[in-house]
């Protein structure tokens, strides 16, 4: 395609065998002659050339190995890939990419909600912990140790709220939520735990968070908890796996003993 004087033009002249600056001058003269004599024919060159460039770029952007990996990654990735591909055929590229990004975010939020599960950790006779489905409701004076699998950000936190055992009707239930290995927690999770702690407090119980990382420990300091009126105890994580959970369990047992003695007295 004809262009103005540029680095590209200089490279083209050199490739054609130019020896001096007159190469650029003669290039312009010949271009002028060609445009005057064959303007109709030259006018048909740009569109096919641009189309060829676009086709070449499109073919070069296809990565079969990447596509194969995405197709093997599950339904969410497959839906996002197919939707973005179809949107690209009928919409401008920017709109198609925007649709693909938005759809990927929605699918990710949905996946977080689906993947989250809550299990109860029950001590065995040998001292080891075994998993079983979390109870739907709490019983009087029951101590429940819960572990959570999956994301605890927005969608996952809302799913956690729906799957925590219901304290309604129970007296003095104690719930220990193990959080070891989670370096960050979202604002929605804090809101869910705060509301759940208030519900247990109304039933005479308490929530214990064990294995809490440094970031969450700073968020839930004693002054802030007292200011919000939340009955919540924090047990930071240690180098020993399960140590903070054992401390929380012992604290829950001691509290139940004190509450029972108070009622008996």
Image: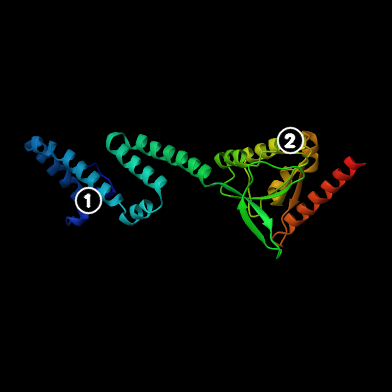
Residue 142 point in image, percent of width and height = 74, 46
**Is residue 139 rendered to the left or right of residue 69?**
right
Report the residue that reaches farthest toward the left.
37
Task: Check disc 2 and report the residue beneath it.
Answer: 198
Residue 131 point in image, percent of width and height = 62, 55
Q: Are marks 2 and 1 in contact (CB under 8 Å)?
A: no
Q: Residue at x 75, y 48 (%)?
A: 234
Neighbours of disc 2 within 10 Å: few (<14), some (14-19), many (20+) = some
The disc, 2 or 1, on the residue closer to the chain's N-terminal end is: 1
**Could you tell me which secondary element the residue under label 1 belongs to?**
loop
Q: Residue at x 89, y 45 (%)?
A: 261
Evaluate whether residue 178 shows in this view: no
Depth check: give the residue in front, 65 or 17. Answer: 65
Residue 21 numbered tag: 1
Residue 168 point in image, percent of width and height = 70, 35
Look at the image and tell me in which quarter the C terminus lies: top right
**Is residue 160 rendered to the left or right of residue 207?**
left
Look at the image and tell me in which quarter the N terminus lies: top left
Q: CA distance from mark 2 to mark 1?
A: 84 Å
Evaluate whether residue 64 shows in this view: yes
Depth check: give the residue in front, 246 or 224. Answer: 246
Residue 16 point in image, percent of width and height = 17, 55
Question: Mark 2 or 1, which is nearer the eye?
Answer: 2
């Amino acid at each position: 395609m004809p262009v103005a004087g540029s680095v590209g033009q200089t490279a083209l002249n050199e490739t054609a065998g130019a020896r001096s600056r007159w190469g650029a001058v003669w290039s312009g003269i010949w271009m002028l002659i060609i445009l005057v004599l064959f303007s109709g024919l030259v006018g048909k060159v740009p569109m096919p050339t641009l189309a060829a460039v676009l086709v070449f770029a499109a073919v070069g952007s296809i990565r079969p190995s990447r596509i194969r990996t995405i197709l093997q990654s599950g339904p969410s990735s497959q839906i996002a890939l197919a939707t973005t591909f179809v949107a690209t055929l009928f919409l401008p590229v920017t709109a198609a990419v925007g649709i693909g990004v938005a759809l990927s975010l929605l699918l990710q939020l949905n996946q977080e909600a689906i993947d989250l599960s809550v299990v109860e950790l029950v001590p065995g006779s040998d001292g080891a912990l075994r998993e079983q489905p979390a109870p739907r409701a709490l019983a009087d004076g029951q101590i429940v140790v819960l572990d959570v699998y999956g994301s605890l950000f927005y969608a996952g936190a809302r799913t956690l709220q729906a799957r925590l055992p219901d304290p309604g009707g129970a007296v003095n239930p104690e719930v220990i939520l193990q959080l070891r290995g989670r370096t960050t927690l979202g604002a929605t999770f804090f809101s869910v735990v705060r509301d759940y702690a208030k519900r247990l407090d109304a039933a005479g119980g308490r929530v214990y968070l064990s294995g809490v990382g440094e970031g969450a420990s700073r968020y839930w300091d004693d002054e802030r908890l007292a200011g919000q009126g939340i009955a919540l105890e924090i047990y930071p994580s240690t180098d020993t796996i399960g140590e903070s959970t054992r401390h929380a369990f012992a604290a829950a047992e001691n509290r139940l003993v004190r509450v029972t003695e108070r009622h008996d007295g």
